[in-house]
Amino acid sequence: MALIVHKYGGTSMGSTERIRNVAKRVAKWARAGHQMVVVPSAMSGETNRLLGLAKDVSPAVQTPAVTRELDMIACTGEQVSVGLLSLALQAEGMEAVSYSGWQVPIRTDSSYTKARIQSIDDARVRADLEAGRVVVITGFQGVDEDMNITTLGRGGSDTSAVAVAAAMKADECLIYTDVDGVYTTDPRVVPEAKRLNTVSFEEMLEMASLGSKVLQIRSVEFAGKYRVPLRVLSSFTPWDIAIEEEAKSGTLITFEEDEKMEQAVVSGIAFNRDEAKLTVMGVPDKPGIAYGILGKVAEANIDVDVILQNVSHDGKTDFSFTVHRNDYQRTLDLLKSQVVPAMGAEAVIGDTKICKVSIVGIGMRSHAGVASTMFRALSDEGINIQMITTSEIKTSVVIDEKYMELAVRALHKAFGLDAA
Ligand code: ADP
Ligand code: ASP
Ligand code: MG
């Protein structure tokens, strides 16, 4: 008997019929003798709908007072899901009980809309499992020390599931979604994308952080920190397929590097449309520019991603960086009101029509010339690179958003992934 955590995403929970299917699949695992904890997301589209309602009522900038209420609203999607799934399990003849994050409790910090899980008390869940119940816990939500409800950021149910699996020392965490595993790139953008049987933890971490939303980055971080056996697989296979078959389908996240040594230099292409670029123009070029600009941005709790400082002309330089699109307006206002006057800069310009495309692969560590293959492939398509950033196992470029799909397809081909 093993302790297994299943996570079902929004599409997998998208209708009452699908929820009944999820219940059948979970019941199959429970009947095979496993202790089951299930973490569902809100039904597809529900979180967007709820946040849309909030926006209609208050388009206000996201102060803590506003984001607290956003979490109060957004978390309800998952609450409906756990109740429905628990009922569906009962209809299958299982004993099942549902919990909200605060009932477990799943404790988080107080960063509304992007809270981090700090601890999970597993006593109540364990008691239920011991009593033979299937436990259904809301994804995406937690509670801070003052009993305020928090949410974990978009896609956060993945993180809830992996964190619960880590806290319970589960034997495996299975992430059921609407694709049958992790692909070389988003199969909805490149139909030639190939499913990976395994992907190393480090590559998965980079892919998630660079925009592959198949797993939320923090779920991958948890899996790495607590060595949670993690697999991504489809919830759209027939619910009654053999457990042995299911248990080896999809993509396994591996922690051993050696296995990957002989594999492709580049394992995957990630892309991200969620960033915006800001440029402070004509800054007098002297020591302290980066701190003068980015220090203020950091004080406002805004995360910066790619940074570029140009060579100077006549003692002046341009300084560009990217932030999340949600932070764009706030950053622009801050630069105009505080940074430009303080630094004696000439102007600020912004661009929200950019995207970041990245190649990821452990093999990049030991192969030269990978970045130049990337730049050639983009240049062959006439795509202008605005910014570049690299690390040991990835290279990212910022380009015009309208070339995103073209760039992803060209890179997928250039690195032999179409043929993989
Ligand atoms: P869920 O609701 O199950 O959490 P998500 O929409 O969050 O599902 O994540 C699954 C989606 O991630 C897929 O439908 C796919 O379009 C997208 N995706 C992006 N990159 C990849 C990738 N490299 N491999 C597989 N899917 C990817
Ligand atoms: N329902 C939340 C969202 O849409 C969390 C999740 O689906 O993982 O972002
Ligand atoms: Mg998701």
Image (tube, rainbow, N blue to C red):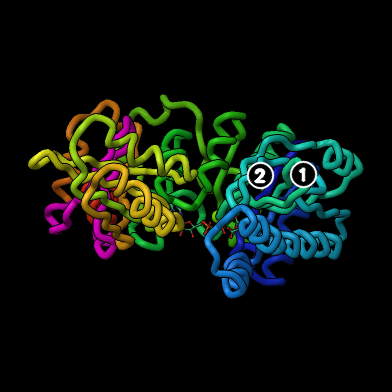
In three-dimensional space, the C-alpha distance between marks 2 and 1, rounded to whole angstroms, equals: 9 Å
Could you tell me which secondary element the residue under label 1 belongs to?
A: loop
Tell me if I can see residue 345 in this picture: yes
| Element marked by disc 2 | loop
- Residue 278 belongs to the span the image colors magenta: no
In screen coordinates, is 85 left or right of 214?
A: right
Q: Position of residue 403 (x, y in %)?
A: 24, 62
Residue 265 higher or lower than 48, as above or below? above
For image coordinates 81% across by 59% down, the residue present is 86
Mark 1 lies on residue? 146
User: Crowding at label 2, few (<14), some or many (≥20) Cα neighbours within 10 Å?
Assistant: many
Using the image as rendered, state which of residue 51 and residue 124 is in the foreground: 51
Q: Nearer the viewer, residue 33 or 394?
A: 394
Q: Quadrant of the N terminus?
A: top right
Residue drawn at (71%, 32%) of the image: 169
What's the residue at 27%, 55% (across, down)?
Answer: 348
Q: Position of residue 268 (x, y in %)?
A: 35, 45
Left or right of 353, for residue 248: right
Q: Amino acid at mark 2?
A: Ser
Residue at the right extreme? 131
Say the numbered circle drawn on residue 110: 2
Crowding at dot 1, Cα within 10 Å, few <14 / some 14-19 / many 20+, comes out as few
Q: Which residues, given as a range, are shown in magenta?
A: 378-407
Q: Is mark 2 within 8 Å of ligand 2?
A: no
| N-terminal label among 2 and 1 | 2
Q: How many marks?
A: 2
Give percent across and percent down for residue 267. Answer: 35, 41
The numbered disc on residue 137 is none
**Left or right for 390, reference 49:** left
